[in-house]
Image (cartoon, rainbow, N blue to C red):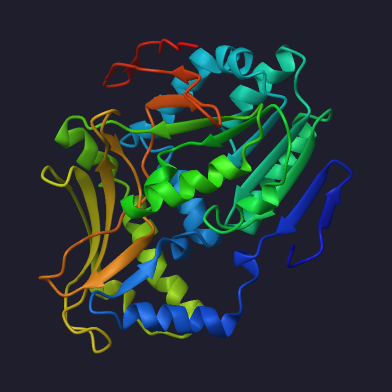
Amino acid sequence: MRTAADARVNEHVRIERGHHSASDPAAEHAEVRGNLLRTLPRIDSKYFYDDTGSQLFEEITQLPEYYQTRTEEALLGNIADEIVRLTGARELVELGSGAGRKIRLLLDAMRRQGRLENCVLLDINETFLRTSAEELADQYPQMEVRGVVGDFLHDLDLVGSGNKRLFLFLAGTIGNLYPRQFATFLTSVRATLGEGDSFLVGLDLVKDTARLEAAYNDSAGVTAEFNLNALRVLNQRFGTDFEVDAFEHVAFYDPEQEWIEMRLRAQRADKRLPRAIIVSSASVSGTRSAPKSAASSPAVHLSTPSGAPVSSCRAGSPTLSISSPRLWCGRSSTAVRNDRVDRPAIAG
């Protein structure tokens, strides 16, 4: 059941609020407080993505050190027509859409093939979602656009039913989940997919340590500001009084865990969390049947210096795979060296 009435932006755009986006402020406050009082305190990563944080992340994707976005865009540019032909998609559904730039490559391919009908964007930030939906409606006037303000963990049911839809989960966003959440999330995606739908997921690969670390230690300091902004969000929304300038950004690759740890480390004692460290890490995960991949995680953790870092931030996706509701209908592989991308081979 929808928690708020639809908001009409123009005749081709509809914005809806999901269950999670309309959460009770008192309950949210209690959740934040409870997380901060844990043995290993934590802050949910959704607090990265207020308007400022979302804009900072968009800036990160344009940085010279942040290879992930341009690599994924290059891959999509190479295979967009083949993806649309393979899936027969007439509607795109992007989970965690952000500014929605990459999907234009697929929308253009759908338009060229005379298939373009609808687009659904789901994102936690309403400002970016609304702007993206309006821009897409202007650029593709033959297409209906629907935006869902929500969390892909809680609001997938609002996507609704359909046929010949291509679900997109790009930019390593699957790493916003803890490994223990993968099965539950993918099961919910499977339940949402119709018989003729497909699912496209983007993952990053483990690569040279210096290149990985440079992506999270940009010379302009944008990633540092992105991390620090989570403290500002808590201060503004919940009345906490974290001294933002008391923390510094630290990011490094952990070869044992195969992930990037991005931390905001206390430079001096803080009366709220003495000697606290705010921890987040971009996990690089995988199984024996899939390439190891850089991902993201669902929370920023606060710990003492001896606490274990177990969370992560977003990463990119130079490997794409396509699946149907019942079985893998396509597979892509690629060799990435610096910024050179070899065209993936997609098998039916």
Residue 96 makes an appearance in the image: no
Residue at horizontal 67 percent and vertical 18 percent from the top: 88
Residue 144 in which image quadrant:
top right
Residue at horizontal 15 percent and vertical 69 percent from the top: 307
Q: Left or right of 312: which side holds 325? A: right
Q: Nearer the viewer, residue 72 or 170?
A: 170
Percent x, y of residue 324: 55, 27
Q: Left or right of 275: which side holds 249? A: right
Height in image: 260 above or below 195?
below
Percent x, y of residue 213: 21, 42
Q: Quadrant of the N terminus?
A: bottom right
Height in image: 34 above or below 203?
below
Percent x, y of residue 288: 23, 30
Height in image: 213 above or below 264?
above
Q: Nearer the viewer, residue 269 or 317?
A: 317
Residue sitting farthest toward the right: 11
Residue 80 makes an appearance in the image: yes
Height in image: 127 above or below 26?
above
Percent x, y of residue 164: 69, 26
Residue at horizontal 23 percent and vertical 47 percent from the top: 260
